[in-house]
Image: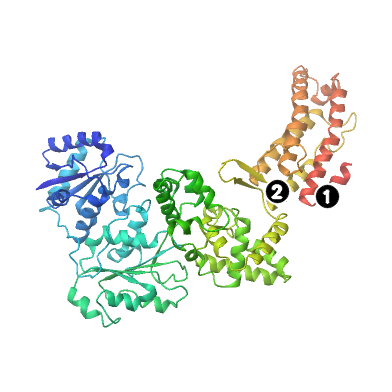
């Protein structure tokens, strides 16, 4: 019997050897796999046997640990053994060599106290204390020992980047075991939601494979679109309560996967497909977000860039072109392995005509992405979003376009736009734009996934309507969009899309305009009056005010290009750098040098009146009036207010 089964990533072997030596010197028996395990599917009988002879698993949880599938199998096995005894941490200990804990899953282990590899003596003492409380080795459930007719499939090689979602599914299904921790009485039901091809079924099946030992009563996979037939295929018939005697006899927890629930079905219809016994744990996969009461949601989005690249051989352009969509990435990855050039695939993906994804799949896979866009409002919103892609779309945007094309009142068009956006959001076909997701202003901003755009190009039932809305979108919205920086496909260069002033720009222009027309410079300083020092201070404070105003409205100071239309950015640049700064840079040091020679018994203003260069500075100050007036008028055109510009002439 081993005190400790040491689980670690092969890349950490040198550091782990030092840890093993310390543990053994401390009188502990330690099993380590020096030969390694090639893949998740190739777990050897030796590893399973030695886990079953160990009191606890000690995970050397480096940043590389969660990426090694064999490590995850070992961790999950020990975790389930502890869970069956009432505490998943009973059979798992963690050594965290990293400065943070965000890479540690599940959350129970992240929140637990972690031993430090920097304190070998303390670590050995902690491990000895922990295993001393364990009288026997962990008990492992045999895979395939349950009563279910459905055997979970082998792990999928394309399952990457979903580790946190995998543990979220498990935690939600077992939240009932710790109602005080989760703050509610859980229903043992999870709904995995997301667009077509995003990996919902794969996540459910991978969960069934990795956590099958938690469900000795069996794993059952049913087709939500043909539920009764799939029940019969599992050797079951009827629904609750007729299935209860069967599961009463089994007497063990079981997993009930309902894959692909019918779109638009009433909640009671879908809820009736859940496991009909208290020992059942149900996982639904569905696109719709219309059933919040169905169970704890686990929403799937695109894969992150690192894992997306992993599926296409590291090609960043292809990964970005389909924005981390797992099905599209898998198809492109297989094409690369078959010898296709990445650039050829990229070009064909964006070519008009037949879909590359359909060609690679040998089937019409794109139809599934948009087949449930079944109302005129949703279709029109999708067309508007496609016309503006990759810019986000808003309810106001769509309302303007529909009002222009259909000649209907804006209130009617706005209602249709809102209905369409709500439907597409419910169908997982629009997602909150990045700036809204980060909590920035403008929560009514929605993004269209490039795979949805690709699918819509193939299956739009009314291309003429699409073209009419596209043209109207360009004509109607060009005066109402904020400047946006776009990455041009394939080039990674950025281009600024110019647009009419945004509300933020108009407000910034007005604030600067008001401040400018009240300053000395625009307002005449008559000979022999006023103070040159105050004039300098006033102009210097105008620079500070302008910069602060731009910062308040999140606007950059930006030099205009030749022939470009005046914007608040370049007008502010001309004001600060081309007009005021040369004046202050010239006259501030001269005036300061003269002021330094002022006798103590002479007043500052009297001393200034005796300055030989005073008339020259006043002349240069008067010369500022014309450029400052032009800037004020430019700001007035942006702000829409002529405040102060007439007086400045």
For residue 46, side relative to residue 459 (left or right): left
Q: For the residues marked 2 and 1, what is the alpha-carbon distance in whole angstroms?
A: 16 Å
From the image, state whether disc 2 or disc 1 is nearer to you: 2
Q: Is residue 359 visible?
A: yes
Give the labeled residue for mark 2: 505
User: From the viewer's perspective, is 180 left or right of 141?
Assistant: right
Q: Position of residue 484 (x, y in %)?
A: 63, 48
Q: Earlier in the sequence, mark 2 or mark 1?
A: 2
Vertical arrangement, residue 249 with respect to residue 389, above or below: below
Residue located at (86% from left, 18% from top): 612
Q: In this image, 273 relative to 640: left or right?
A: left
User: Residue at image x 19%, y 67%?
Assistant: 146
- Residue that carries the numbered disc 1 in the rendered image: 642
Local packing at callout 1 (Cα closer than 10 Å; few below 14, some 14-19, many 20+) is some
| Residue 394 seen in render | no
Q: Residue at x 13, y 35 (%)?
A: 25
Q: Quadrant of residue 557?
A: top right
Residue 451: x %, y % from top left: 51, 57
Provide the secondary structure element on which disc 2 rests. Answer: helix
| Quarter of the rendering occupied by the C terminus | top right
Q: Residue 10, position in %: x, y?
A: 26, 39
């Amino acid at each position: 019997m081993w005190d400790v089964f040491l689980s670690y990533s092969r890349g950490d072997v040198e550091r782990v050897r030092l840890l093993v030596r310390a543990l053994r010197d401390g009188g502990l028996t330690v099993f380590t796999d020096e030969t390694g395990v090639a893949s998740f599917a190739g777990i050897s009988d030796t590893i399973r046997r030695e886990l079953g002879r160990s009191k606890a698993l000690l995970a050397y949880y480096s940043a590389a640990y969660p990426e090694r599938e064999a490590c995850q199998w070992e961790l999950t096995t020990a975790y389930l053994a502890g869970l069956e005894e009432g505490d998943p941490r009973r059979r798992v200990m963690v050594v965290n060599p990293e400065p943070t804990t965000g890479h540690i899953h599940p959350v129970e282990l992240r929140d637990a106290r972690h031993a430090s590899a920097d304190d070998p003596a303390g670590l050995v003492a902690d491990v000895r204390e922990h295993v001393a409380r364990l009288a026997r080795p962990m008990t492992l459930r045999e895979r395939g020992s349950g009563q279910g007719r459905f055997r979970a499939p082998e792990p999928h090689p394309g399952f990457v980047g979903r580790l946190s979602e995998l543990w979220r599914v498990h935690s939600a299904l077992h939240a009932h075991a710790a109602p005080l921790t989760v703050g509610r009485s859980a229903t043992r039901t999870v709904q995995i939601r997301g667009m077509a091809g995003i990996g919902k079924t794969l996540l459910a099946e991978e969960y069934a494979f990795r956590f099958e030992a938690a469900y000795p009563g069996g794993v059952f996979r049913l087709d939500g679109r043909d539920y009764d037939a799939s029940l019969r295929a599992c050797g079951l018939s009827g629904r609750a309560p007729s299935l209860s005697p069967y599961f009463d006899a089994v007497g063990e927890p079981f997993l009930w996967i309902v894959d692909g629930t019918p779109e638009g079905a009433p909640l009671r219809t879908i809820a009736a497909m859940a496991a009909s016994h208290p020992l059942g744990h149900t996982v639904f996969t569905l696109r719709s977000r219309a059933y919040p009461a169905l169970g704890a949601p686990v929403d799937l989005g695109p894969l992150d860039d690192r894992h997306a690249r992993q599926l296409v051989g590291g090609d960043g352009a292809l990964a970005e072109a389909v924005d981390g969509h797992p099905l599209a990435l898998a198809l492109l990855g297989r094409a690369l392995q078959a010898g296709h050039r990445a650039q050829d695939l990229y070009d064909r993906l964006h070519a008009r005509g037949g879909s590359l994804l359909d060609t690679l799949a040998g089937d019409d896979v794109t139809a599934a992405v948009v087949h449930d866009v079944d109302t005129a409002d949703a279709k029109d919103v999708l067309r508007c979003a496609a016309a503006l892609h990759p810019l986000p779309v808003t309810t106001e945007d769509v309302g303007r376009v529909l009002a222009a094309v259909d000649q209907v009142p804006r209130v009617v068009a706005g209602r249709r736009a809102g209905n369409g956006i709500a439907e597409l959001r419910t169908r997982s076909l629009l997602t909150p734009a990045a700036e809204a997701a980060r909590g920035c202003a403008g929560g009514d901003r929605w993004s269209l996934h490039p795979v949805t755009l690709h699918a819509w190009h193939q299956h739009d039932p009314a291309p003429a309507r699409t073209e009419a809305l596209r043209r109207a979108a360009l004509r109607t919205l060009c005066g109402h969009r904020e400047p946006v920086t776009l990455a041009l496909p394939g080039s990674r260069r950025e281009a600024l899309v110019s647009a009419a002033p945004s509300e933020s720009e108009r407000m910034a222009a007005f604030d600067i305009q008001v401040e400018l027309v009240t300053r000395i410079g625009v307002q005449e300083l008559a000979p022999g009056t006023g103070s040159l020092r105050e004039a300098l201070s006033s102009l210097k404070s105008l620079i500070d005010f302008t910069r602060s105003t731009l910062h308040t409205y999140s606007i950059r100071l930006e030099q205009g290009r030749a022939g470009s239309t005046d914007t608040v950015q370049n007008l502010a640049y001309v004001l600060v750098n081309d007009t005021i700064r040369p004046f202050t840079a010239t006259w501030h040091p001269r005036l300061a040098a003269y002021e330094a020679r002022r006798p103590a018994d002479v007043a500052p203003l009297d001393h200034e009146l005796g300055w030989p260069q005073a008339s020259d500075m006043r002349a240069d100050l008067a010369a500022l009036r014309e450029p400052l007036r032009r800037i004020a008028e430019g700001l007035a055109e942006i702000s829409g207010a002529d405040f102060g510009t007439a007086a400045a002439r």
